[in-house]
Image (cartoon, grey):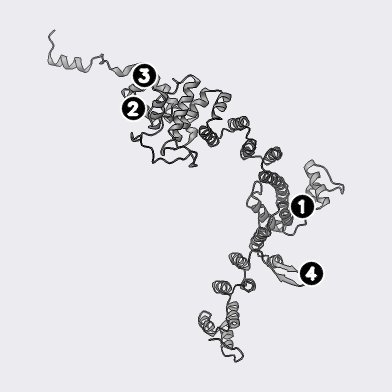
Amino acid sequence: MNRTKGDEEEYWNSSKFKAFTFDDEDDELSQLKESKRAVNSLRDFVDDDDDDDLERVSWSGEPVGSRTRPGSFQSLSDALSDTPAKSYAPELGRPKGEYRDYSNDWSPSDTARRLRKGKVCSLERFRSLQDKLQLLEEAVSMHDGNVITAVLIFLKRTLSKEILFRELEVRQVALRHLIHFLKEIGDQKLLLDLFRFLDRTEELALSHYREHLNIQDPDKRKEFLKTCVGLPFSAEDSAHIQDHYTLLERQIIIEANDRHLESAGQTEIFRKHPRKASILNMPLVTTLFYSCFYHYTEAEFSEIHLEAFLALTRGKRTSSGQEGKEVCKGTFSSPVNLKKTFKIPDKQYVLTALAARAKLRAWNDVDALFTTKNWLGYTKKRAPIGFHRVVEILHKNNAPVQILQEYVNLVEDVDTKLNLATKFKCHDVVIDTYRDLKDRQQLLAYRSKVDKGSAEEEKIDALLSSSQIRWKN
C-alpha cells in the first residue's frame, strides 16, 4: 500500500501499538513485592568477601560476638513493623529487569551472603523449620549483626514463640541479638515472655520495673512501683526499688502540701521564691535540695506524724481531730528526715544543704551547718567536704567578703588558702598569712595589688615598718 511521507509520519507518531518487552511479567512484580519483608534496606556494599576489618558490635555499639555492618538500619524498629515498601526497599524504583535473577532458588548460604551485601532476596521460600534454622546458622557464621537480626525478624514473624525461644536457647549469639533487638524496639511483652521462658528471674524483674517509665500519673506510678518491691531483684537492686517507691510516695505528699501552701499565699518562703517546677519524679538529690530550700527548719518524723501520714493516705482525721495534711507539714519534707530515711552520706547532705542555704543567703544557717560541739561544750568548725569547696560555693552565691574571709581562713593548706584569698580578694587573709610566714618580699609585692590609700595598704605599711617581726627575707 502506497503512503505519502506525511501519512507515514502520522502512522508512526499516532500508533496505538506498543512493542513487546520482557519486563512486563507479572510474576516478577509479585516476587518483588514479596521480597519487601527481607532486609533490603541495607545499602549496597563493595563485593568484597574479606570481612576481617569489620568490628564485632551490636546495633547500639555493644560487643555481642558478631560483626555489624555500618550504614544499614537507622533503627531496628524500621525492620520490624509492616511499614510501606519504600521504608524497606529503596531499590523498588529500579528497572524491573535488574531483579530478574532474584527469583532463583538461592540456598541458605547464598541468601545470607546476598543479605550481607544488601541485595534484595525473599526469605519466604524457607518454609520448613530445618531450612529456617539453617538460614540462621549461616547468618551467625558470617558474624554480621544486620543479617542475624534480619533473619530473626523473619523467624519472629513465622514461628511460634515457644519454638523460637526453644531454638534460640541453644544459640546464644542469636539470642543476645534478639534480646537487644526487643529492648531497642520496646517490645516489653515479648521480652518478658522470653525471660520467663529462660527462667531469668532477675532480668524479668528489671524489665517489668522499666515499664514504670511509661506511666505518667504519679499515683499510678507509685502503685506500680509497689508491685515491683517483692520481685526477685538482687539485694542492691531491691534496695533501689524500695527507695524509689518510698521517694515517690513522699514526693506526692510534699507536692500536695506545698501546692496548697503556695496557693494560700500565707507562707513567706513561697511568696518570695515561687516554685518553678513540681517535685514529682525528681531525683533524690534534687528532692533534698528542694527540702533544704523550702523546709530547712522543719521537724523530724515522730509518732504523731506517722499517725497523721496514715490518716492522710486513708483520708481520715487524726486522734487530735486535725486533718492529716496539716499535721504532716514539716515531717516528710524535713531535710534531716530525708537524710536518715535514704541514708544520705554526710558529704552529700552538707554539700546540698550548703548550696540551698547559700542561694537564699541564709548565712546563719551556713554557719550552723559547720559548727560542732564536743562533750565539753566547746564549738569548732568542721566541713566534711573541705573548706576550700565551701569557699567556692559561697563565692558562687555572691557571699560577702567578710563571710568568705572567715571560711578561707579555715583552709588548712597554706598554698590553697593563699590562692583562694588572692582569687577572691580576701586581702586581710593574704596579709595575715604572709605576716605569719614572715615573708616580707611577698607582702611587699602584694602591696601593689591593693588600692592606694586603702585600709589594707595602711595595714601592710604598718607590718613592714614593725620592729617586732623578724622577717625571713
Q: Amino acid under label 1?
A: Lys
Point out the tag, 2 or 4, that comes first from the N-terminus: 2
Q: Which residue is mark 2?
A: 94
Q: Which residue is mark 4?
A: 375
Q: Amino acid under label 3?
A: Glu
At label 3, counting other C-alpha atoms closer than 10 Å, the crowd grade (few under 14, some 14-19, many 20 or more) is: some
Q: CA distance from mark 2 to mark 4?
A: 88 Å
Of the numbered discs in the image, which one, if any, rests on residue 329? 1
Q: Are marks 2 and 3 in contact (CB under 8 Å)?
A: no
In which quarter of the view is residue 423 placed? Answer: bottom right
Q: Which residue is mark 3?
A: 28
At label 1, counting other C-alpha atoms closer than 10 Å, the crowd grade (few under 14, some 14-19, many 20 or more) is: many
Which dot, 2 or 3, sits closer to the camera?
Answer: 3
Which dot, 3 or 4, sits closer to the camera?
Answer: 4
Q: CA distance from mark 3 to mark 4?
A: 93 Å
Quadrant of the drawing holding the N terminus: top left
Q: Is residue 361 visible?
A: yes
